[in-house]
Image (cartoon, rainbow, N blue to C red):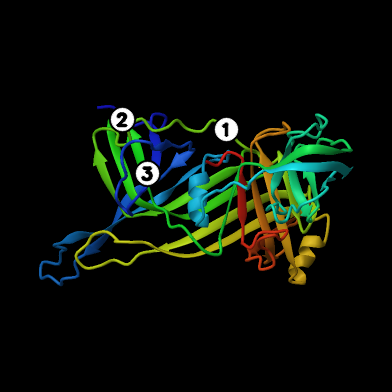
Amino acid sequence: MSTASGIYKQVAYKEEVTYGVAPGAASAQSIRRVTSSLDMTKDTYQSNEIRNDFQLADFRHGLRKVGGSISGELSAGTYADFIAAALKKAFTATAAITGMSITIGGTAGAWTATRAAGSFLTDGVKIGDVVALTAGAFSAGNLNKNILVTAVTALVVTGLTLNASLMVAEGPIAAATLTVRGKKSLIPQTGHTDKSFSIEHWYPDVPTSEVFTGCKVSKVSFGLPPTGMATCAVEFMGKDSTTAVGQYFTAPSAVTTTGTMAAVNGVLRVAGATVANVTGLTIDIAAAQSGEPTVGSNTVAFQAAGRVIVTGQITATFDSTAMRDAFYNETEISLYAAFTADNSALSDFVAFGLSRIKVGGASKDDGEKTITQTIPFQALLNTAGGAALASDMTTISIQDSQAA
């Protein structure tokens, strides 16, 4: 028998039809990872009997449960299923807006696309969306280019290119199409989903399989450092685990091949301004899960969902008083970020929209160095957003160019 090696270990998952019951073995999805620490644990109970021999005579196993995380480097499409589970809504596409007459204008960082008739608001374009002009006789510098929307009215979309390239003033261009790229998920007002997954660790060099059932996402954490790869860590709470000699999920789909992301590629906007002084950003989505043990069962029958709480932290050089004053004055601000896999015009990306956050601190370090502020924040429901308005009525929205 060989000793298990992490390089051979394979991780695959599939959404369950019934909570805690492993789904059919076909059509699972392999997932990329840096680590996967899922494991089954048990509560243990030690006898409290007082004995004349001064010794402990019994020790028992109790409730079985699964916990741990899958962590990796952020890439488009890879973690979309788990992100959607945390947000309680599937990723969905916004219908492409076709047949418009579009005029391009503006300046670097504030390019405008003006339509002759209709309404971008009614068609579902929001601040923070990444869009592209995908049809029409536009100049090459305007066509098929990622644009982060910074403002939107019925007739005008204002935005900036994700790769900092220039656009060309022209138009009107007939038969134009504007596309909100990929798909979006957000915490909805109604119709919340409650998904669970079975996740397999397959060790072909032993060989043995461990299938963890009833796994619900309890937290998704994004780390966006100024150097190094952007990261995504997904924490789970699960019901139970089974083992077998052979692989359970037969021929799972191959892992995604999209490029990994680094926070140096993309755009970050805080309080309505593009910023270049941020030295780090984290975003945490905590999707509470809880279950009650019952007499006669060594597993929790069901995990009930709780609120979805979004928090984060910005670290930034102290070259402006804007974020400090947002803390001092309890001023609500916005945060929009889009990170790309490379610097090409139509690169894959993951974008985050938090249109209402409140800063909870602005502490500063010291030393013979650039002074840095640490700025924790709490994201809140944007009650001013909604259908046919410029922003979403949600706490956070996430757009993924390759979400299925």
C-alpha gap between disc 3 and disc 2: 22 Å
Farthest left residue in view: 52
Tag 2: amino acid: Thr
The residue under label 1 is: 258
Q: Residues within 10 Å of mark 3 (few under 14, many from 20)?
A: many
In the image, 261 versus 102, the foreground residue is: 102
Tag 3: amino acid: Ile
In x, y percent, where is residue 363?
71, 63
Mark 3: secondary structure: strand
Q: Earlier in the sequence, mark 1 or mark 3?
A: 3
From the viewer's perspective, is 141 left or right of 301? Answer: right
Mark 1: secondary structure: loop
In x, y percent, where is residue 321?
82, 61
The residue under label 3 is: 199
Query: From what the image shows, is residue 132 above or below residue 358?
Result: above
C-alpha gap between disc 1 and disc 3: 22 Å
Q: Is residue 2 visible?
A: yes
Q: Kindly indicate whether the residue at mark 3 contacts the one at mark 1 (C-beta within 8 angstroms).
A: no
Q: Earlier in the sequence, mark 1 or mark 2?
A: 2
The residue under label 2 is: 3
From the viewer's perspective, is 217 left or right of 113? Answer: left
In x, y percent, where is residue 308?
52, 62
Q: Residues within 10 Å of mark 1 (few under 14, many from 20)?
A: some
Q: Name the residue: 58% across, 38% down.
A: 402
Q: Which numbered dot is residue 304?
A: none
Q: Residues within 10 Å of mark 2 (few under 14, many from 20)?
A: few
Q: Name the residue: 55% across, 45% down.
A: 232
Q: Name the residue: 32% across, 67% down.
A: 292
